[in-house]
Image (tube, rainbow, N blue to C red):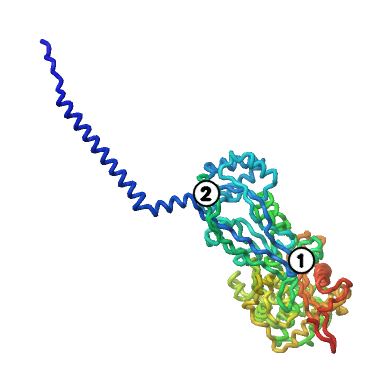
Amino acid sequence: MPQPIRLKDHEKDARVVRKRVLVGALFILLMTAVLMLRMYYLQVVQYEHHSTLSESNRVHVQPIPPNRGLIYDRNGVIIADNRPSFSLTLTRERAGDWPAVLDTIVEVLALGSDERALFEKRVRQGRRPFEPVPVLFELSEEQIARIAINQFRLPGVEVAAQLVRHYPQAEHFAHSVGYVGRINEQEMEKLDKVAYSGTHHIGKTGLERFYEEHLHGEVGYQEVETNARGRVLRVLKRTDPLPGKDLHLTLDVKLQEAAEQALAGRRGAVVAIQPATGEVLAMVSQPSFDPNPFVTGIGFKAYAELRDSIDRPLYNRVLRGLYPPGSTIKPMVAVAGLDAGVVTPQTRVFDPGFYQLPNHSHKYRNWNRSGDGWVDMELAIARSNDTYFYSLAHKMGVDRMHDYMTRFGLGQRVALDMYEETGGLMPSRDWKRERYRQPWYPGETLILGIGQGYMQTTPLQLAQATVLMATRGKWIRPHLAKRIGDEPVLNTNPPPDLVLRDPKYWEYGIQGMESVLHGPRGTARKVGDSAVYRIAGKSGTAQVVAIKQGEKYDRNKVAERHRDHALFVAFAPADNPQIAVSVMVENGESGSGVAAPVVKQVMDAWLLDESGQLKAEFRTPQSGEEAQP
């Protein structure tokens, strides 16, 4: 039986519809109320906060790096300046897939894999967010054109003009002035990030590092308005940076060149100091290198060639080279012996060609195997007689030797502003016991008296010890900077002056040094005979390899790089010291024959006028004459 058909209840359906409409209307009203409340909260309650955020999206604060201070020699010749350069910068936050962008840069500029690796290293060392990082410096016009044509493929990449450190003297001052380089991650952790905002370079070596605080300057800022892509539309506010202070050095470009010419391409070091002031006039370490590639980032291959060179051009021989001083310290040992009271100027020693300790059979040889007979102090210095100084060292003992030589500056850092300087080594009983767990032997004292054995000195220390002879013990630390801005560099914290019991002791040591060059039996009399002024000096030979007892040095049996080093120290004019020079020629063998002529060439360049005569300001005033100002 079929089911009855139900009639539609229109009133019921109408009630359902009304309920749904009501619920929907209430929901819409509720959502509208929530939206209005949210809008009120954002636009009224948090107005200041979001207004600031919005302004930050439009206005950015950009650091303005300061111009680095310039560096001049003593006569105003520029040694380090800032040269305009176009650089390629990358902002990681705007580049998106920045490794791919780097690949495109390499492709566009036709660069190699080394450059690509260097670019990535620089980008990964990026600084603050949205700060452009220079990846390539000194762009050529062709490179700039290629970047412009392919700009659509290089998001976040821009060509920016900036000042880059430049060293017009190239390798001449690489070991003294040093160079700047890119700030690495380790340095960035230690630096004041505010002070170095926008700065990508910092002093790495030499004076650039030592005086970084003065050369850097103070950073400036500017508020700029940018568009959605980060392009600067206009500058709203600017605070100019303060440039770094200029550095005026004691070095003389012409004397530096003269010292390099005197070395004539040989490996070695030259230091020239003005005794009265401690000003370093020349400081040469050869071979050297061009510091300019280090500023913008030297390539891996180029750096490897410098690092692995057998001649070690990166090695600062003046400050870090450690060599036995050899006989150059004999005048200092003689003065120490006089002051200690163990000898007098007239004390004589018989030299048969060797020296023996009492009750010992071992013979300590004099360089002159036939011996010099009876020698006093002056002749011992002039002839560089080893036997005399073996005897003197034995009388003094290692303790007094250590005390006096330390007061002469050996075995310690002597400079005022040379960051890389090493202290060398002046051995003692305690040092040997701690280092080797052995006692000190009498024979070691003997060879200490002729500047051999454990003793290690730098050419700078020998120059300073020579200055102390010239100034009769007046201590002024050698320094490279003469003025920082308008402020003179002060001689801060010098060691105490070397005061002797009798000031005449200095004259006996100096008299012996003059006899080296002007005495009838002096070892460097050939050099002295050609001088128009009197020189006080001393030669030295530093052994590179030991020679067995009884054997004689034969240069033909020794490899060139194993031959003795040649040293010479001197000051002049002897009666009015204006310059003190220390020279070391690696494997030069003869201090008097090789190093002494270098010393004289340097002195001539400083002391003589164009006519070959002693300059008027360096002449000793004669009776009735007034001294030159």
Pinpoint residue 364: horizontal percent, then vertical percent: 75, 74
Q: Is residue 189 visible?
A: yes
Pinpoint residue 422: horizontal percent, then vertical percent: 65, 68
270 relative position to 440: left or right: right
What type is the residue that disc 2 sits on? Thr
- Residue identifier under label 1: 253
Pinpoint residue 590: horizontal percent, then vertical percent: 81, 68
Q: Is residue 351 visible?
A: no
Q: Earlier in the sequence, mark 2 or mark 1?
A: 2
Is residue 564 shown above or below 127? below
Density class for disc 1 (Cα within 10 Å; few <14, some 14-19, many ≥20) is many
Quadrant occupied by the N terminus: top left
Q: Label 1 near label 2: C-beta < 8 Å?
A: no
Q: Which mark is residue 226?
A: 2
- Element on which disc 2 rests: strand
Quadrant occupied by the C terminus: bottom right
Pinpoint residue 86: horizontal percent, then vertical percent: 66, 50
